[in-house]
Amino acid sequence: MLGEKIKKYRDEKKMTQMEVAEILGVKPATVSKYEAGTLEPNIESLKKLAELFQISVDELLREDGFDVSKINILEVLREQKNMKLKGNLYHNTQITFAYNTNHIEGSKLTEDQTRYIYETNTLLAEKDSITDLDDVLETVNHFKLVDYMLDKTDKNITEEMIKEFHEILKEGTSDSRKKWFVVGNYKKLANEVGGLKTTEPKNVERDMKKLLEWYESLKQVTINEIIEFHAKFEKIHPFQDGNGRVGRIIAFKECLKNNIVPFIILDKEKLFYYRGLNQYQTNKEKGYLIDTCLNAQDQYIKLIEYYLKNY
């Protein structure tokens, strides 16, 4: 099964066994043995193959018959959104995404409360607890933002679109009533993230234009470029608040646009995620953030398989 996958992905890349062998640092005959199933790659070769094929090691080793590449995820999400289908991929993407992305940023709502808000448009109150209204509003707004993002997925990412994402996310919150906060526009006050200085307000527009020009110049967009865009976006930190959530919705959108399985960073993985961003942004190590995102991608593949294995 592993050998068949290696051959399949190599053929899709239109690469010869010799070209793959050069990347792995082995002989072409070794690659031939991998594909024939008479020899298994070591862990270093598996990592290099996964990076070459733009998938995770787990996906390369997966031995089930489910082929996620045959699923048009964007089409499915749009169809289920329009159908208002309950209890399937779109429904659970909304809940999983809103709960985790908001919880990473400090929301106190539980996953059950998030689900209840989405399914009933009411709040499930917990005894002797006080609910922050902004947490509720930003959860509802995130549901709207996902729908808006799905409608805009085919379009190229622009400054205007990014600002629209921010405005939808923060609409009606206490921040939206602060003149200096400028919801839907770039920050006026300096900020930092993880102890690192971000772009000064006066330079945000310049740096955002450079980021988008770089991204638009790419001949091919893979998950690695999307992760790099995300790291650069978060380093700029263009808004007063909400940068992480806007950045993660952009990454989700761009995965869908480029027919790549998207990823949702889970709250339980936030320390790995923060560490990965820090190391990427300080030019220490890119692999930590990439691995964290690929692991999150694996989790979303499992969600897709559960709901769409008979699709």
Image (cartoon, rainbow, N blue to C red):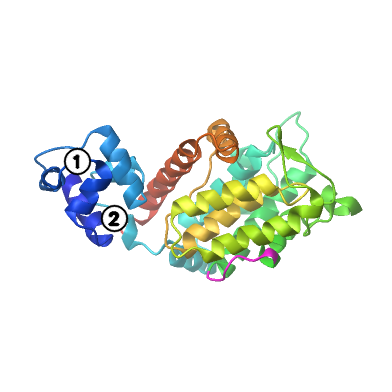
Q: The residue tagged with tag 1: helix, strand or loop?
A: loop
Q: CA distance from mark 2 to mark 1?
A: 28 Å
Q: Nearer the viewer, residue 97 or 190?
A: 190
Overall secondary structure of the magenta stretch? loop
Q: Is residue 226 left or right of residue 48?
A: right
First of labels 2, 1 by sequence position: 1
Where is residue 192 drawn, in percent x and y? 74, 38
Q: Nearer the viewer, residue 111 or 4?
A: 4
Kindly state the secondary structure of the residue where label 2 is placed: loop
- Horizontally, is 181 left or right of 286 in the view? right
Q: Is residue 118 left or right of residue 238?
A: left
Q: Is residue 199 above or below residue 209?
A: above
Magenta stretch: residue 12 in it? no
> Dot 2 corresponds to which residue?
67
Circles 2 and 1 in contact, beta carbons < 8 Å:
no
* Number of the label disc, if any, that sits on residue 290: none
**In the picture, residue 123 is in which quadrant?**
top right
Residue range of the region highlighted in magenta in the rendering: 154-159
Q: Amino acid at mark 2?
A: Asp
Q: Where is residue 252 drawn, in percent x and y?
A: 53, 55
Q: Amino acid at mark 1?
A: Val
User: Is residue 62 at all visible to an observer of this figure?
Assistant: no
Q: Position of residue 105 (x, y in %)?
A: 68, 39
Residue at the spot 88% in from the left edge and 53% down from the top edge: 177
Q: Residue at x 63, y 56 (%)?
A: 143
Q: Nearer the viewer, mark 2 or mark 1?
A: 1
Which residue is the site of mark 1?
Answer: 26
- Residue 307, image x and y in percent? 39, 53
